[in-house]
Amino acid sequence: MGRRGARPPRVPAPRRDRGIAVKIGYLQLRPQFGRTKENVRAAKSMLVGVTDATVVLPELFNTGYVFRNMEEVRDLAETAAGVTVTELRKVAVAQRLNLVFGFLEAKNRKYYNSSALITAKGATHVYQKAHLFDREKLFFQPGNGAFKAYPVEGAKIGMMICFDWFFPEVTRSLALDGAQVVCQPANLVLPWCQDAMRTRSIENRVFSVTANRIGMEKRGNISLTFTGKSQVVSPKGDVLASASERSETLKVVEIDVAEALDKHVTPNNDLFRDRRPALYKALLRKAV
Ligand code: ACM
């Protein structure tokens, strides 16, 4: 223990001699159910002229969302070597883009609600959604992979998908693995995510990009309206870009990604060093 009244030691801030400028953004789309070719073509045409950026597309942007049965899932699923990933890899490499997008993945006769990160150098990383929402549980397996940050030119990128936001452990795990930009393909139907992602960004000091879809999908007796309002948020919770609820739109903003390296909240608080994992044991217990 220090002397009574002694000031706590200051935690040195990381050196930031220069910023690291990168461009990040979202492509908000209105996919048509079951029309993979058209959906991929529409995304590619909206990306024409965009270069040297990280762009996030919605969850399941290539297939649509409201599946009625397992047969539809099987018909529309692709492997990570399928046409969607292959086509978007061509765009990523030609336009020096890191693309993050949701797709319906078939792997070892199982089906996942997945997202891919295709880097500007052509590398592919896949994340399988861990927290399935509502009827997704009828069709998809939950992913069991670790939440990982992947290095791309100038930044480290983490992926989560839509409803994963409801579990703050996801963004925290990505941030602890070094993610500076958390990319969230989404098909949001509940109203809270955009506000919550500001908190996720603040409490982890990371940039976040939520790419939501718009439009309504009515299939049989199920009808869902997607909420749009894709956004880019800074590590201090500022909304750097925000889309409407109604239009397909692409927005890219320039950020200093080094802002996500500084985890200080006050000169005496570093939000990673101040964590108390020994007190968080309940997090590892199963719910009763
Ligand atoms: C969702 O996870 N698509 C709401």
Image: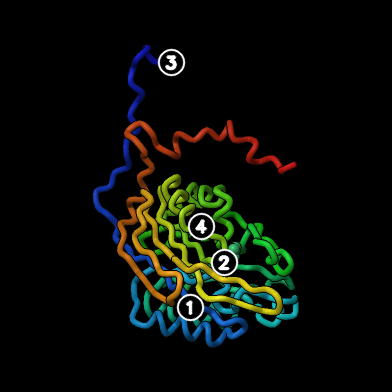
Please rate how many residues cluster around mark 3, counting C-alpha atoms within 10 Å: few if below 14, some from 14 to 19, many from 20: few
Judge from the rendering whether residue 131 lies leftward or rightward of residue 213; answer left or right: right
Contact, CB < 8 Å: mark 2 with mark 4?
no
Mark 2 is on which residue type?
Val
Where is mark 4, residue-wise?
Answer: 193
| Quadrant of the rendering where the N terminus is positioned | top left
Asked if one can make out residue 119 in the rendered structure from this viewpoint, the answer is no
Residue that lies at the very extreme toward the left in this rendered image: 17
Q: List x then y, in percent, for residue 25.
A: 39, 67
- What amino acid type should be assigned to the residue bearing mark 4? Cys
* x then y, percent, for residue 136: 68, 66
Q: Is residue 277 above or below residue 144?
A: above
**Distance between the Cα atoms at labels 4 and 1?**
29 Å
Q: Which residue is mark 1?
A: 89
> Of helix, strand and loop, which one carries label 4?
helix
Which amino acid lies under the numbered mark 3 shown in the image of this protein? Met
C-alpha distance separating marks 2 and 1:
13 Å
Disc 3 or 1, which lies upstream in sequence? 3
As rendered, which of 19 and 62 lies closer to the eye?
A: 62
- Mark 3–mark 1 Cα distance, whole angstroms, equals 56 Å
Q: Is mark 4 within 8 Å of ligand 1?
A: no
Disc 1 residue lies near ligand 1 with CB under 8 A: no
Residue for badge 3: 1
Query: Of the residues under marks 3 and 2, which one precedes in the sequence?
Result: 3
